[in-house]
Image (tube, rainbow, N blue to C red):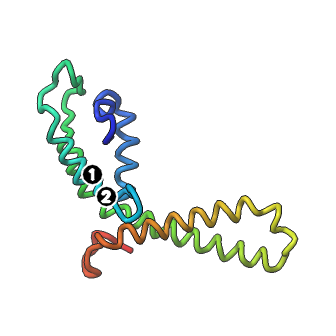
Amino acid sequence: GLVCPQLLLKSPRVLEIFKTAASDCLVLPVYRDLVLNVHAELKTLASWFPKKVSKEYPAPKGLKLDKIMDALGKEAPQTCGKKHKERLSYVTGELEKLTFLLQTIPGIVAPKFPVVLATLAMAQSEVLWLFRHQSILPAKSSKTFDL
């Protein structure tokens, strides 16, 4: 979407995939502690597009890119916290099961090693997601970002 926004206008299926991806996070890591506020950039990008359908940007009738980006910006803080809370609880449960399994049957470490690595990678991803989004978390009294 940020790299090739014309593609969003051509196919409704690509637009749905983009909506799903954009509602998953509020910021994207660029380099170390440098992050990109996705929804602010999407709003800026949507404002650059012409409001009318032209030959350069053939959009389906009734598609308002700026309204879609505004809706994504409002929806993402409400949904991504819940998704990642569920993922974090799932990963925690899987890590507990793996720990118990590997402690009771130590000989199974070698066959289960790819599963252990995949679970640890998923846990790392969720912890990094939490730290990246911690700076933009609303106050605890707010119910928009539930973590």
Q: The residue tagged with tag 2: helix, strand or loop? A: helix
Residue under pointer 1: 72
Residue under pointer 2: 76
Q: Which dot marks residue 101?
A: none
Categorize mark 2 by other alpha carbons within 10 Å: few (<14), some (14-19), many (20+).
many
- Above or below residue 48? Residue 138 is below
- Above or below residue 8? Residue 127 is below
Question: Relative to the observer, which residue lies in front, 121 or 85?
Answer: 121
Question: Relative to the observer, which residue lies in front, 60 or 120?
Answer: 120
Q: Quadrant of the N terminus?
A: top left
Q: In which image quadrant can residue 52 be found?
A: top left
User: Which residue corresponds to the image point at 65% horizontal and 73% vertical from the top-left?
Assistant: 95
Position in image of residue 90 (x %, y %): 57, 69
Amino acid type at image mark 1: Leu
Total marks in image: 2
Categorize mark 1 by other alpha carbons within 10 Å: few (<14), some (14-19), many (20+).
some
Question: Is residue 92 toward the left or the right of residue 47 in the image?
Answer: right
Q: Quadrant of the C terminus?
A: bottom left
- Above or below residue 119? Residue 102 is below
Q: The residue tagged with tag 1: helix, strand or loop? A: helix
User: Which residue corresponds to the image point at 49% horizontal and 70% vertical from the top-left?
Assistant: 127
Position in image of residue 106 (x %, y %): 84, 75
Amino acid type at image mark 2: Ala
| Mark-to-mark CA distance, 1 and 2 | 6 Å
Label 1 with label 2: CB-CB less than 8 Å:
yes
User: Which residue corresponds to the image point at 22% horizontal and 54% vertical from the top-left?
Assistant: 40
